[in-house]
Amino acid sequence: MSRKMEHSRVLVTGGAGFIGSNLVGELLCNGNEVICLDNFSTGRRDNIACYMGLKPFTLFEGDIRETVVCEKAMDGVEYVFHEAALGSVPRSISDPCTSTDVNVTGFANILMAAKKCGVKRVVYASSSSVYGDSANSPKVERIIGRPISPYALTKRVNEEYAELFATVYGVESVGLRYFNVFGPRQTPYSTYAAVIPKFALELMSHRSPVINGDGGIARDFTYISNVIQANQLAAMSADPRVANTVFNVACGFQTSVNEVFHALRAELAKFDQGISAIDAVHGPERKGDVPFSLADVSKARELLGYCSLHDFRQGLALASEWYWHNLKK
């Protein structure tokens, strides 16, 4: 099986976001016709500026919470990559209703539109957060715990909706449980920014990053190229065991926040030696954070042919170079 989707008409929801815009770029490079649906609540126009004016690219500005928008954007589409969501555990704790509206109602609208438009398959972004309070490590797809944040619950509900729509309506889908994705175009400017770009901006500005708690929390940090690969493999696979199931997307290696800080500082110090003298400071722990998150990727490896294209340190080197040349210091 080819590892790249080619010559298809596809929709990427949240296509102006971090993951979505990287996926759009890869799909365009492979000769696909790409429709990007985004309402720019968290997506950035800068992320897709380089695609504007290209014949195979169409920007459809709209909100997935509106049924008619989903149907119009999906007209004539073969595959849907659903990346649109309100991310962030802290954001969902602060405003659970909006996270639920976007992540659950919006996803149901996408599935209904896929049914109406005859889409071949929906590949959707789930999350490692669905493992919740499960003490099992590494995380395997069949064993999940209770969600410990509203965001985690919305992603759990997405998986339940996908299973239901397969059974009741025949809508085919594949869920990808992302583990702490990082890389180019991930913004550090939001209150709810992810840890790696946030640390990068602070270090490049010669400020001390704040580590929540003692920094012992560990994650399976996953470079964006691995996620882009997994999306294409999930869409194209003809293996009947792939349809209507979920897969971990990660590296299968755990790194603590303290280790992330030191590794990132070393990478950025290659551009500015003064960064090597900056130390982090520690703040209070965040509510809703899972202490440890390590993925078992054997299911994706066996059924999708997935493999990690870049491990954490390789990805961090690539991301650091992008941060240095693109973030406002």
Image (tube, grey):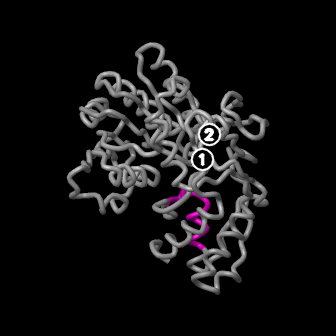
- Check disc 2 and give the amino acid type: Arg
Q: Residue at x 45, y 61 (%)?
A: 185
Marking on residue 301: 2
| Vertical arrangement, residue 37 with respect to residue 161, above or below | below
Circle 1 packing at 10 Å, graded few (<14), some (14-19), many (20+), is: some
User: What residue span does the magenta drawing correspond to?
Assistant: 190-202
Q: Are marks 1 and 2 in contact (CB under 8 Å)?
A: yes
| Vertical arrangement, residue 75 with respect to residue 202, above or below | above
Q: Secondary structure at mark 1?
A: loop
Q: Residue at x 66, y 32 (%)?
A: 141
- Check disc 1 and give the amino acid type: Cys
Q: Quadrant of residue 129?
A: top right
Dominant SS in magenta? helix
State the residue position of label 1: 307
How far across and how far down the image is residue 191, in percent?
53, 58
Marking on residue 209: none
Q: Secondary structure at mark 2?
A: helix
